[in-house]
Amino acid sequence: MQVTNEVLPTDPARIMAMMEKGPDGPIFMVNLLKFKDKADYEDGRATDLSGRDAYMIYGRAVTDLLPKFGGRGLFAGDVTFLALGQVEELWDEIAIAMYPDRASMVRMSLSDEWREISVHRAAGLKGQLNIETVAPQNGTDSPFLAMLAAGNGAAS
């Protein structure tokens, strides 16, 4: 499996696919984030910020922006260990956001407010993967989700 980190989508076919309706119901966007060692702003401004620090400016602002589009942040955590599989380099952080639908996510990312804060995102990110996920149509069809809903056991 080849993995290519990107900061913005570059494949025209993928951009067109993002504009399609998408699945019904909420989407949960899994963000695998890789930070630059030092922030690098496209406008050439001088900074002593690390890539992570620049991205955190974006992260705080986008957390406030998400609810305006029906979304919310659900989880963010540092990647500390690869327990299974092999990759050349681990991502630095994982974040999960929920949107009511794909169109809401696209509207947010095309908004003036998002474009204003995204300069910090671009300055801080070396690359990322965004993976759209949805809950199964009937959560009980998934033994794992059924176990979580019933409150039985801890995730492993």
Image: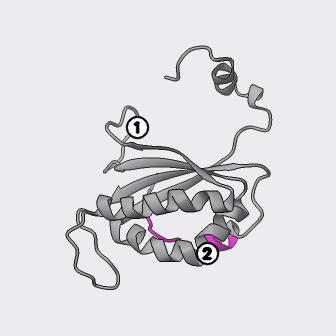
**Residue 4 visible in the shown view:** no
- Nearest to N terminus: mark 2 or mark 1: 1
Q: Where is residue 96 shown, x and y percent of the image?
A: 53, 47
The magenta stretch spans residue 135: no
Q: Is residue 144 above or below residue 127?
A: above
Instruction: Give 54 or 144, whichever is nearer the viewer.
Output: 54
Work out whether 81 lies above or below 108: above
* Residue 23 against residue 150 in the figure, above or below: below
- Horizontal placement of 98 versus 75: left or right? right
Closest to the observer: 54 or 129? 54
- Residue at coordinates 40% horizontally, 37% vertically from top-left? 85
In the image, taking residue 79 as reference, residue 71 lies left or right, namely right
Question: Which sits in the foreground, 70 or 104?
Answer: 70
CA separation in Å, label 2 and label 1 = 37 Å
What residue is disc 2 on? 111
Q: Quadrant of residue 14?
A: bottom right
What residue did someone put label 1 on? 85
